[in-house]
Image: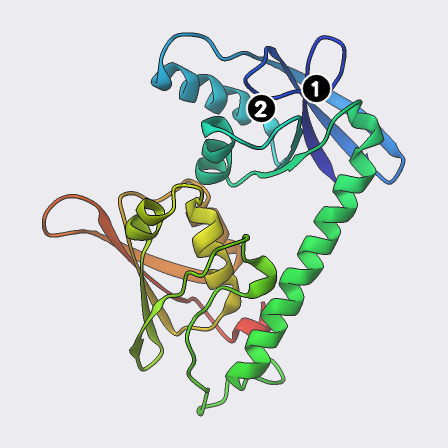
Amino acid sequence: MKIAVYIDGQGRLVSLYEPGQFCIYEGSGGDWIAKREIAFAVDNGGLAAVKAALAAAVADFGDCEVLLSGSVKGFLYSYLQEEFGLRVWKSEGMPVEQLAAVEQHEVDRAAQQQDNAASCVAAAGCSGGACGGGRARRPAVIPSAAMPEGLSTAAEDLGGGYFRIDLAGALEADASLNSRQILLPILESSAFDTLEILCDHLPRWFEPKLHDLNLKADCTRLDHGHGVKVIVAHDRGCAGSR
């Protein structure tokens, strides 16, 4: 596994709002090797400059999707999750003492997602890797195990396996959430035949995740010119065969 950590000059985990560097570790259990270091600091160049600096740093992460840092709060962390799909963990002290724990959390998270997907497939009436014709319909509610505390977002059931969610409205209603927290559990649940998403723009994590989940999407501009409508459907086969 690869885990990025953000540390100060003394090698301690700190917030991204402090000058420091990202260090990419690779390994497992108690055996980790530092592969590369990426300097980073928030300057006074404005929001655009901060975004550009963060994007440049993340470009050197390679296929690393996990970040361990001294904090998880603030715009920088929301931006990392929203635009780049990073999973962020918080701890303190020296990172090498925390990497095994982060790895285990990631393993547990992945196992929980598989359990959620299997439960949804079973409830939908799929078996043996093939879909039956009489699949049960139900609201595409975010699985509780993946639901952030206080979140109760559900897609609107339009009938016939067609669901709709106003992402822009959901984000406006609760600024503490990001698109990944709202959409990903729904996409992973396989509880829909077609999902319509209304949003201002598509986050960067969206298209790669669709590929991972064997989903496809058609995107069109809304008539008034502000925002897009995305129609998501299953690309091939049954969700249970992914």
| Residue where numbered disc 2 is placed | 60
Q: Identify the residue at the far right of this view.
A: 30
Q: Residues within 10 Å of mark 1 (few under 14, many from 20)?
A: few
Check disc 1 and report its element: helix, strand or loop.
Answer: strand
What residue type is disc 1 on?
Arg
Q: Quadrant of the N terminus?
A: top right
Q: How many marks?
A: 2
Its colouring scheme is rainbow
Q: Position of residue 67 (x, y in %)?
A: 64, 33
Q: Which numbered circle lies on residue 89?
A: none
Query: Is residue 210 something one can see in this rendering?
Result: no
Check disc 2 and report its element: helix, strand or loop.
Answer: helix
Q: Position of residue 138 (x, y in %)?
A: 43, 80
Residue pictured at 82% horizontal, 27% vertical: 96
Residue pictured at 54% horizontal, 17% vertical: 17
Q: Is residue 205 left or right of residue 7?
A: left
Q: Is residue 216 above or below residue 204?
A: below
Residue closest to the eye, 83 or 215: 83
Contact check, label 1 and label 2, Cβ < 8 Å: yes
Marks 1 and 2, how far apart at CA: 9 Å
